[in-house]
Image: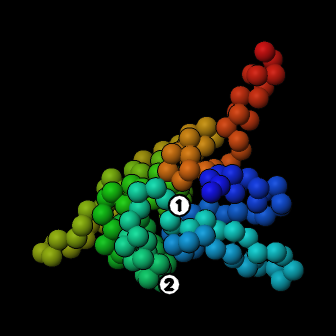
Amino acid sequence: FYAPAQLLQEARRQQVRVRPVDVHRSDWDCSLEQPEGALEVPVLRLGLRMVKGLSAAAAARIIGQRSTGFGSVADLAVRCRIDKRDLRCLAAAGALAGLAGNRHQAGWQVMGVEQPRPLLQPAEEPGGPLLPPPSEGQDILLDYTHLGLTLGRHPLALLRRHLQRR
């Protein structure tokens, strides 16, 4: 009956490392990953089920297609037949960071994804704008909005100096 954010906080207090949702590595459920070093303890990888609004069918197609890797957000969308709603959910949750760099870039790339038409060749992907990465506060807010938890600092940490002065 504990919220995921509470479980995550307790795991961190117990020195458990947690990695974010990633279309290249996350299963549907949260899972343990074995680190590179043989003596290191496993780390917890957040699962695709944590992404609010993501359909289970889209997640299953991602998991089924990722063995060869995804070259871009458009490649992911076409190969996995993912609609814009699911793509927006993944981008907002930070799950496309491995493909796009950050949430802002991922959101921009999602807006440019079009489903292929049978008579036309797919267009070359134009270079998008170099959007600045989200601020720490924006990342925390988006994490709570789209995942229900954050791997970043506690939100009050952003206000700590201001609160101490008061």
Model colouring: rainbow
- The residue drawn where x is 43% and y is 81% is 65
User: Does dot 1 land on a helix, a strand or a loop?
Assistant: helix
Asked if residue 78 shows in the view, the reply is no
Residue kind at label 2, given as amino acid type? Ser
- The residue drawn where x is 64% and y is 68% is 45
Name of the residue lying farthest toward the right: 39
Residue kind at label 1, given as amino acid type? Met
Q: Decide: few, some or many residues near mark 2? Use Cα within 10 Å; few <14, some 14-19, many ≥20.
A: few
Relative vertical location of residue 68 with respect to residue 87 in this rendering, above or below:
below
Relative to 161, is 64 on the left or the right? left
Residue tagged 1: 50
Relative to 19, is 132 on the left or the right? left
Give residue 90's quadrant in the image. Answer: bottom left
- The mark closer to the camera, 1 or 2, is 1
Q: Nearer the viewer, residue 74 or 143?
A: 143
Quadrant into which the N terminus falls: bottom right
Give percent across and percent down for residue 160.
76, 29
Name of the residue lying farthest toward the top: 166
Question: Label 1 vs label 2: CA separation?
Answer: 21 Å
Give percent across and percent down for residue 154.
71, 41
Q: Decide: few, some or many residues near mark 1? Use Cα within 10 Å; few <14, some 14-19, many ≥20.
A: some
Going from N to C along the chain, the mark reached first, 1 or 2, is 1
Residue 161 tag number: none
Residue 67 tag number: 2
